[in-house]
Image (spheres, rainbow, N blue to C red):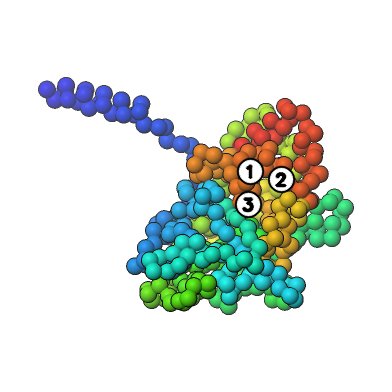
Amino acid sequence: MGAVLLVLFVAALYSCEKLLPATPESNEVLAEPIGELSASQLSLHIQGDGEFARVFGTLEGLGPVFVQNSCESCHVGDGKGSPVNNLTRFGRYGDNGEWDPMLDWGGPQLQHRSILNFDPEKLPSAAASSQFVAPNVTGLGYLNAVTDETILSMADPLDLDGDGISGTINYIEAPEWLQPDPRYHTPLVDGKYIGRFGRKSGAIDLLMQTVGAYKQDMGITSDFDLVDPVNYGATGLADDGVADPEISGGTVNKVVFYLQTLKAPGRRNEADADVKQGSAIFSQVGCAKCHTPELTTGPSEIAAINEVTFYPYSDMLMHDMGAALNDGYTEGTALTSEWRTIPLWGLGLQNDSQGGKMYLMHDGRAQDYEEAIQWHGGEAAASKTAFFQLSETDQDRVIKFLDSL
């Protein structure tokens, strides 16, 4: 009898294995830690992962106005979001010609949801606005560890080499609580620093980006920023009733470490002949002038990030993308038509986190590679023209290369 049960048990296991999906390869998923973490670093990464997935409610201090109730809600599986969860940023130019983030109107971000007995924000009629798709958050530790010197070496604001590509810096004022790491950051203009995160390079480092996301996206205060977001268009300005700070600085730092120690997206089909040719054509038509294939990090206590070469396909600079991508919104010193070169790594995996469809560009307006390329103008216009002059076969090779990233 026991032998019969054993046979039935083994048969059942075998049947289940055939029904279950195969375990994905490491280069087919985004949500994994980088290698070479010590036991204590891995523990901190796991704690940060838990905080990244944490869902906030009113008892934890959500709101009173907010966009989403968790980090994971926008960055599903650490991947890109979809337009369903787009962020709305707004502001305007003041009479002095300087950009006004409209802080006294609840800017720079619209919180279109609210907790009970509060009104969500409405976009001010005088504001210019732009929609932002949440980016994937993998490999950010590498970008965080690039030195200002490296970024400046790629900038060419006056286009002195005459190639039609400038590449500028967005200079950002550091909040009082932020002390940028001198290994990577040097104050450059009036004490301002190089912005390197966000669609407009509005954040200096991952700490600034994370603190801003907690407050602007979820209405969660921390030791770094103690003030709840306020709907200035409503009659009452009361807070959410939960004592501030709603999370500690230690919690924020755990999430920052989690983001620092997420692996860089892996390549797939790298040895394929068409992929190799597509990579060469990508450079030949000039795409690699902005989507720089490789960068090198500075020193880091995280072994996998310490002075290593990595492949983000970004120069981390701002580029004028032309009138079609000018939403009239900006941050810092950037022009309204300038956008940060978003890293292309993970491109071929992003539809897994976007509901099975692909949404490209800063607001998800393009649903395939060709449409995204078509939107490129300004400094990218020549490369766009060169791409569409390629044979259909060569265009397909470029697409296969992009899908391998």
Judge by depth and name the residue closer to the eye, 240 or 321.
Answer: 240
Q: CA distance from mark 1 to mark 2?
A: 8 Å
Asked whether the residues under the numbered discs 2 and 3 touch, taking CB atoms below 8 Å apart as contact, a structural biologist would say no
Q: Residue at x 70, y 48 (%)?
A: 291
Q: Farthest residue in the left direction?
A: 1
Viewed as shown, does residue 41 lie left or right of 83? left
**As shown in the figure, which amino acid type bears the numbered disc 3?**
His
User: Observer-nearest residue: 36 or 328?
Assistant: 328
Mark identifier at residue 366: 1
The disc label shown at residue 299, or none: none
- Mark 3 residue crowding within 10 angstroms, few (<14) / some (14–19) / many (20+): many
Q: Amino acid at mark 1?
A: Ala
Distance Cα–Cα, label 2 vs label 3:
11 Å
* Quadrant of the image occupied by residue 274: top right
Secondary structure category for the residue under label 3:
loop
Residue at the disc numbered 3 = 362
Name above or below for residue 378 compared with residue 179: above
Residue that appears at 68% across and 53% down? 341
Relative height, residue 99 to residue 339 (above, below): below
N-term-proximal mark, 1 vs 2: 1
Please report the residue visible at 38 percent of the width from the left and 66 percent of the height from the top.
116
Task: State the CA–CA distance, disc 1 to disc 3.
Answer: 9 Å
**Quadrant location of the N terminus?**
top left
